[in-house]
């Protein structure tokens, strides 16, 4: 069973159990609306043997438009609205979570947006707008308690009022801090943050961010905890591979006691009742008492990749990202361990979908939540182990339009679903393919929508008439596992899908008619032998496009700055390779487009002859990447960026004139991806972080 199905089945099982136990949660007493997601069937991997011939179904069309062009926005399809989430903001790619025991409210923050999701009674009810880092991709850490909510990145701290959503205070630090080691002391209303250079720890008032005290800090890492009416700092002594524990008066911040701990610094939690640390290292979690002489230490086995340890209500909670990868369950994404802090006995292992890095719990231990890489949080009853998943935001990354004008939206980072919207913008369905639908395509001859699911290495086949997922094809390669985003191209002439997989350095040619793998095209070893796949995060690492009349496959490897060609009419034999670079690809990493009607390849704003690979022109000034053409009407479509303002362009087919422009949303961390559908005569602009699709009439 592959990774995608394990994730899916685990999620289904969790939801079924959780519905019966919802009333047990401290902060999940009301039920969420039942999901209408339709899951896909079993994945099957087969092979296909086909021969192909050159066939040109495209006419060049006129050089200039045959009718007046006027770009007009018709609608902004809001994915959150389709999914029953608040529409006053968005949280994307959840990074940290927290629970405020004083109010029973939970919060979640993401990397790709600056909002904080507010979770009440088991449902995301609103967003708090912090403006922290704009819409940047900075890691933002969230802390809450005692009616305080604080979010921080390396150079900024924001304290917000959780009731009004207004900013109470904001601090920009003079040097980079370590927000992942920060600590919010709700008992004393303090926020503690280390700055390595200079080596100091600053203690702020959690509400006002006024500086209460500055303390010297060592060169290593440190962690803070509440120890009754005192504060406990655990500092790393890196060279000695030991730690130092220092207790401070919580009012005056004077040091009261110091102790050397002959254990190396690691991921840890503090048990105030036993005055002991629990530290993860080398496949186990070990108790280290602080108040008594070292004796037999309690411990239990744990995964190697523990992300967090905490102690709540006599339980040791351990969250792992991918800890249950084994021969029996290869590739499982991780989960939560619960052990008795008094005996060190492991009581429960909760296997969860998605990847995780952060756990929080109520002080009474009745409920906990874990952040999920699937843009959600898992709410878990500590006593029973029952869990449920709560979505906190959505995304809009890829788009397809079927023959009836229905819109399909790839919601990869929002939970791997595909909302389907009618031509009148009413929700028809929400489909659940395998994890990470990174590319969508429509075949008019087959009347099918295809979804390439990166983390499942599969392609889902959607029947538009229902709509529903009716088949699932395997790609015959290992599941994706990194942030290096895959890409999809579709040869409508020959009904062949091309799925590019960066971490496999390969492109799989899949027969759209039968679902069989035609070929797996691997990149030359000279381009891949020194590449670390973990460095290939984000979009645009491996781009793919196909010139249908000659079935020539174009592949751009960003790390090598090489454009490669493969001859689909000759067993995908390697052809000419040229070196290309473009600064515009930093802003628009999907900017590889082929105009089938005029045999042109667009690489950013550069234009090449498909057959000779010689440069033959450029887009008009301001336009930076082309994404579609209406050959019959003589209009090309592109997007440009100037000073954080994106603009949509309509250009004459011969590139001689800009016909019209219209402003798109500004200051987006992930640039707009454009799609044009000749059937509807409309442009669809996907705004990932906003979780919206802008719909524009052209004529």
Image (cartoon, helix red, strand yellow):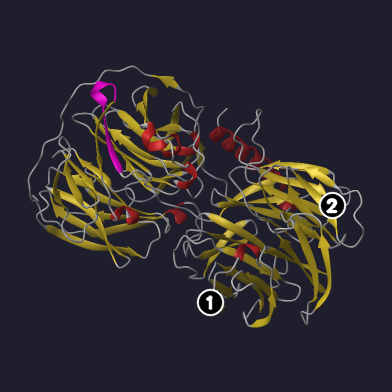
Q: Which quadrant: the C terminus?
A: bottom left
Does residue 119 show up? yes
Q: Quadrant of the N terminus?
A: top right
Q: Which residue is found at the position 54% from the left and 52% from the top?
A: 375
> Quick one: SS at disc 2?
loop
Q: Residue at x 37, y 65 (%)?
A: 667
Left or right of 175 in this view: 503: left
Q: Quadrant of residue 463?
A: top left
Q: Position of residue 520 (x, y in %)?
A: 38, 26
**Residue occupied by mark 1:** 174
Report the residue that reaches farthest toward the front.
239
Asked whether, in this view, residue 271 is left or right of residue 124, the answer is right
The residue stretch that appears in magenta: 562-572
Q: Which mark is residue 233?
A: none
Instruction: Note whether 76 is above or below 281 in the view shown.
Output: below
Helix or strand or loop: what does disc 1 sit on? loop
Horizontal and vertical percent for residue 287? Answer: 83, 52
Mark 2 vs mark 1, CA separation in Å: 40 Å
565 in magenta: yes
Q: Is residue 676 above or below residue 168?
A: above
For the residue carrying disc 2, how many other residues have a C-alpha within 10 Å: few (<14), some (14-19), or many (20+)? many
Q: Nearer the viewer, residue 556 or 262?
A: 262
Foreground of the two, 30 or 213: 213
Query: Is 38 covered by the magenta stretch?
Result: no
Residue denoted by label 2: 341
* Label 2 vs 1, first from the N-terminus: 1
The label nearer to you, 2 versus 1, is 1
């Amino acid at each position: 069973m592959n990774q995608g199905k394990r994730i899916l089945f685990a999620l289904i099982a969790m939801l079924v159990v959780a519905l019966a136990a919802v009333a047990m949660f401290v902060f999940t007493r009301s039920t969420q609306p039942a999901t209408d997601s339709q899951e896909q069937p079993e994945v099957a991997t087969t092979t296909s043997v086909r021969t192909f011939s050159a066939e040109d179904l495209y006419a060049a069309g006129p050089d200039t438009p045959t009718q007046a062009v006027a770009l007009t926005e018709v609608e902004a399809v809001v994915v959150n609205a389709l999914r029953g989430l608040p529409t006053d903001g968005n949280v994307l790619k959840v990074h940290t979570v927290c629970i405020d025991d004083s109010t029973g409210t939970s919060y979640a923050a993401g990397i790709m947006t600056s909002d904080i999701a507010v979770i009440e009674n088991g449902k995301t009810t609103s967003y708090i707008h912090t403006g922290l880092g704009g819409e940047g991709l900075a890691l933002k850490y969230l802390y809450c308690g005692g009616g305080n909510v604080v979010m921080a990145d390396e150079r900024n701290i924001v304290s917000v009022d959780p009731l009004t959503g207004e900013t109470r205070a904001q601090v920009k630090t003079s040097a980079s801090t370590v927000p992942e080691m920060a600590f919010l002391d709700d008992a004393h209303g303090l926020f503690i943050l280390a700055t390595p250079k200079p080596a100091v720890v600053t203690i702020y008032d959690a509400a006002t961010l006024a500086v209460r005290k500055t303390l010297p800090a060592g060169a290593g890492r440190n962690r803070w905890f509440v120890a009754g009416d005192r504060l406990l700092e655990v500092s790393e002594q890196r060279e000695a591979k030991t730690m130092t524990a220092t207790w401070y008066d919580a009012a005056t911040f004077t040091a009261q006691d110091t102790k050397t701990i002959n254990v190396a610094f690691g991921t840890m939690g503090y048990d105030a009742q036993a005055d002991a640390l629990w530290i993860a290292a080398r496949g186990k979690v070990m108790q280290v008492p602080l108040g008594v002489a070292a004796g037999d230490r309690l411990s239990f086995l744990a995964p190697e990749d523990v992300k967090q340890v905490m102690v709540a209500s006599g339980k040791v909670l351990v969250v792992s990202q991918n800890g249950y990868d084994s021969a029996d369950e290869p590739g499982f994404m991780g989960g939560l361990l619960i052990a008795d802090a008094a005996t060190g006995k492991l009581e429960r292992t909760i296997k969860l979908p998605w990847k995780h890095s952060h756990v929080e719990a109520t002080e009474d231990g009745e409920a906990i939540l874990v952040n999920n890489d699937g843009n959600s949080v898992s709410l878990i009853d500590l006593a029973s182990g029952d869990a449920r998943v709560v979505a906190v935001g959505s995304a809009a990354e890829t788009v397809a339009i079927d023959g009836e004008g229905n819109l399909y939206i790839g919601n990869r980072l929002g939970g791997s679903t595909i909302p389907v919207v009618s031509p009148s913008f009413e929700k028809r369905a929400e489909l659940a393919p395998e994890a990470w639908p990174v590319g969508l395509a429509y075949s008019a001859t087959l009347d099918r929508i295809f979804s390439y699911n990166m983390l499942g290495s599969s392609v889902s086949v959607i029947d538009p008439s229902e709509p529903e997922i009716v088949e699932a094809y395997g790609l015959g390669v290992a599941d994706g596992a990194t942030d290096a985003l895959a890409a999809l191209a579709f040869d409508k002439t020959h009904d062949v899908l091309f799925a590019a997989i960066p971490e496999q350095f390969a492109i799989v040619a899949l027969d759209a008619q039968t679902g069989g793998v035609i070929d797996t095209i691997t990149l030359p070893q000279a381009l891949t032998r020194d590449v670390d796949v973990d460095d290939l995060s984000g979009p645009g690492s491996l781009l793919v496009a196909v010139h249908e009349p000659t079935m020539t496959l174009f592949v751009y490897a960003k790390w090598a700055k090489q454009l490669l060609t493969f001859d689909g009419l000759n067993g995908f034999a390697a052809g000419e390779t040229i070196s290309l670079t473009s600064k515009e690809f930093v802003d628009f990493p999907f900017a590889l487009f082929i105009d089938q009607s005029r045999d042109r390849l667009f690489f950013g704003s550069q234009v090449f002859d498909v057959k000779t690979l010689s440069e033959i022109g450029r887009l008009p000034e301001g336009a930076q990447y082309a994404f579609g053409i209406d050959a019959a009407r003589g209009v090309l479509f592109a997007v440009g960026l100037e000073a954080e303002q994106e603009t949509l362009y309509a250009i004459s087919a011969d590139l001689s004139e800009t016909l019209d422009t219209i402003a798109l949303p500004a200051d987006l961390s992930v640039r707009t991806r454009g799609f044009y559908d000749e059937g509807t005569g409309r442009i669809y602009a996907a705004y990932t972080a906003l979780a919206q699709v802008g719909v524009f009439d052209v004529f």
